[in-house]
Image (cartoon, rainbow, N blue to C red):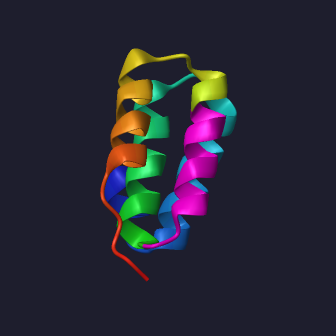
Amino acid sequence: LVDAARRTAAGAAAVLERVLRVYPTSEAHWRLLVDELRAHTPGDDAAVEAAYTRALAAVPSVRLWADYIGFTLAPRPSP
């Protein structure tokens, strides 16, 4: 599933969104979605932030919270 989805950023996100409609509490799939967004939409922190917001509302996971905190504390390049 993931290998097929990685062909394009839009394809990966679309496949993972469909999976999350079926398995909305799958921590692993939320983490994959966030990873895909971070890898394929660099600089679009709003999309990553929105994905984390949705993920944390669906799955109150310590691991997701740790990932989110790491994301928010990571240094960003200056514009």
Q: Is residue 57 magenta?
A: no
Q: Does the rendering let one see residue 18? A: yes
Nearer-the-camera pick, 69 or 36: 69
Q: Height in image: 17 above or below 77?
A: above
The percent position of residue 50, horizontal first and vertical second, equals 64, 49
The quadrant of the image that shows the C terminus is bottom left
Tell me which secondary structure the magenta stretch mostly adopts.
helix
The residues colored magenta run 43-55
In the image, is 28 to the left or to the right of 59?
Answer: left
Image quadrant in which you'd find residue 5: bottom left
Residue at the far front: name it: 78
Which residue is found at the position 48% from the left and 49% from the top?
A: 33
The percent position of residue 71, horizontal first and vertical second, equals 38, 46
In the image, is 73 to the left or to the right of 54?
Answer: left
Which residue is found at the position 66% from the left and 25% from the top?
A: 57
Residue at the far bottom: name it: 79
Image quadrant in which you'd find residue 60: top right
Figure label count: 0
The percent position of residue 54, horizontal first and vertical second, equals 65, 37
The percent position of residue 49, horizontal first and vertical second, equals 57, 50
Which residue is found at the position 31% from the left and 58% from the top?
A: 3
Nearer-the-camera pick, 78 or 36: 78
Which residue is found at the position 43% from the left and 28% from the top?
A: 64
